[in-house]
Image (cartoon, grey):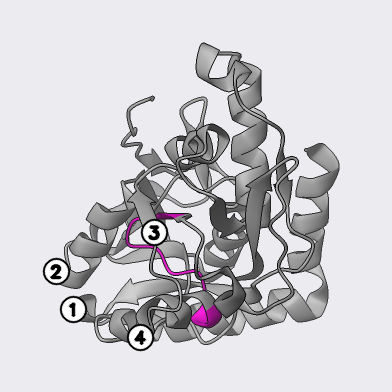
Amino acid sequence: MKKMMNIFILMSLYFPFNVWANNVLDLVIDEYPPYTFATNNTIDGISIRIVEAAFKRMNQPINLRVLPWSRALKLLKEGKVDGLIEIFKNEERETYLDYSKVVLIDEVVSLFVVEGSEINFDGELSKLSDYHFGARHDYSYGTEFDQAVADKVISHISLDVEHERLILKLCTGEVDILVGEKNVVAYRVSLLKSLKTNSNKRCKKIEELSTPVQSTPAYIVFSKKRELTDIRDKFDIILMKMKQDGSYQKIIDAWRESH
């Protein structure tokens, strides 16, 4: 698997040089395409473009870095970075993160199986308790799935830090069901197919079960230790205005048309 890149992007095209000295927000992301990801030495994605547009309106310079998910959460908790783009809300994270009060984007959490599987899902996770799930380490999948795990309704879980390895585990039968955001998993599956490795050749087609687990809002967050609620509140005002004036939806539509 490719190594995670640390990429720094200074958006000097947007802001005058003298602004950068003391006021740059240090924001981190995980590789989570199509929402946030690194490509060709740049950071891109639907959520990245929305966030960039909002901060541009605020005249607020930002610095973007790609970090492994667990490390990003650790640095946020320690106050060593300012914020993170694209994260679900849960009680434990709210102890050290100031969440935006306006939803950045809604994600759909779904279940995936291999073609020909007899597994069905009607919305009741308890009916799947005997199956072995694959999931990302330190991830939240929304209140429904997270609660099922907490209550031991879902107790057979293999955790990994990379989507690609989880997809291969599903292909090879190490796990029965993969849980993930529908667009993210579709993107990763497409990417793996394009690599045409021996492991991929053995993979059956991966299918999304028709009933989603939950539609879950994702947010931008800021480290409580950095005391950035004023920035958060200004961002919320701008993001709400973007939704009201249509510019938010234009960004999403432009992305979909070009991909």
Asked if residue 246 shows in the view, the reply is: yes
Q: Amino acid at mark 2?
A: Glu
Residue nearest the observer in this picture, 137 or 47: 137
Circle number at residue 229: 4
Quadrant location of the N terminus?
top left
Q: Classify mark 1: helix, strand or loop.
A: helix
In this rendering, the label closer to the viewer, 3 or 1: 3
Of callouts 3 and 4, the N-terminal one: 3
Residue 2 x, y percent position in the rendering:
38, 25
Q: Which residue is mark 2?
A: 78
Q: Residue furthest left?
A: 78
In this rendering, the label closer to the viewer, 2 or 1: 2
Q: Magenta stretch?
A: 134-144
In this rendering, the label closer to the viewer, 4 or 2: 2
Q: Is residue 177 above or below residue 201?
A: below
Give me the residue at 18% from left, 78% from top: 225
Distance from disc 2 to disc 1, alpha carbons, whole Å, reads: 7 Å
Q: Which residue is mark 3?
A: 157
Residue nearest the observer in this picture, 93 or 113: 113
Left or right: 97 with respect to 193?
Answer: left
Check residue 141 for magenta coloring: yes
Of callouts 2 and 3, the N-terminal one: 2
Distance from disc 3 to disc 1, alpha carbons, whole Å, reads: 33 Å
Q: Amino acid at mark 4?
A: Thr
Q: Dot 1: within a 10 Å radius of its alpha carbon, few (fewer than 14), some, or many (20 or more) residues?
A: some
Check residue 195 for magenta coloring: no
Q: Which residue is mark 1?
A: 225
Give me the residue at 50% from left, 82% from top: 143
Q: Classify mark 2: helix, strand or loop.
A: helix
Q: Dot 2: within a 10 Å radius of its alpha carbon, few (fewer than 14), some, or many (20 or more) residues?
A: some
